[in-house]
Amino acid sequence: MREIVSEAVRLVLPERVTLADANQVLSALQAALPPGGAAVVVDATPLQELDSAVLAVLLALRRLPQMQGRALQVDGAPERLVELAQLYGVAELLGMR
């Protein structure tokens, strides 16, 4: 779930993040997040099944790096995730591209 690539830590979302899985996914991602240092990149490429709970997971995950002055961005977001993030006004906060 974690890979360090050129000064960035890459975390990978699972195929499914819904309300039923949100707490477990967040716990796993937080456990994989090393303290301090590099920026955080969340790879959303595997994500296939999602609901708005994925935004809560990503926003909660963003808190620790943000408090440490590190950036968090989401790469490879499927269209549905981008649409939800835009609808809720958080796409820019999550550094979606």
Image (cartoon, rainbow, N blue to C red):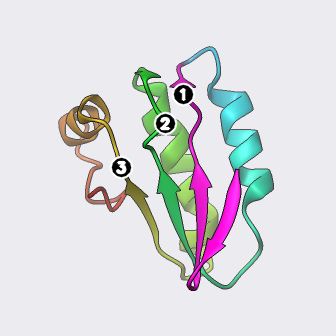
Give the amino acid at mark 3.
Gly
The image quadrant where one finds the C terminus is bottom left
Residue 9 on the magenta segment: yes
Which numbered disc covers residue 15? Answer: 1
Report the front residue among 10 and 23.
10
* Above or below: residue 80 compared with residue 58: above
* Residue, disc 3: 76
* Above or below: residue 60 compared with residue 9: above
Give the amino acid at mark 2.
Pro
Label 2 neighbourhood size at 10 Å, few (<14), some (14-19), many (20+)?
A: some
Query: Residue 3 at what x, y percent from top left?
Result: 67, 65
Residue at x 70%, y 58% (from the top left corner): 2
Asked where in the image residue 19 lies, by quadrant, the reply is: top right
Label 1 neighbourhood size at 10 Å, few (<14), some (14-19), many (20+)?
A: few
Query: Residue 32 at what x, y percent from top left?
Result: 76, 56
Q: Mostly what secondary structure, the magenta segment? A: strand
Indicate the secondary structure of the residue bearing disc 3. Answer: loop
Residue at x 43%, y 24% (from the top left corner): 48
Residues tagged 1 and 2 counted as in contact (Cβ below 8 A): yes
Residue at x 23%, y 34% (from the top left corner): 79
Give the amino acid at mark 1.
Glu
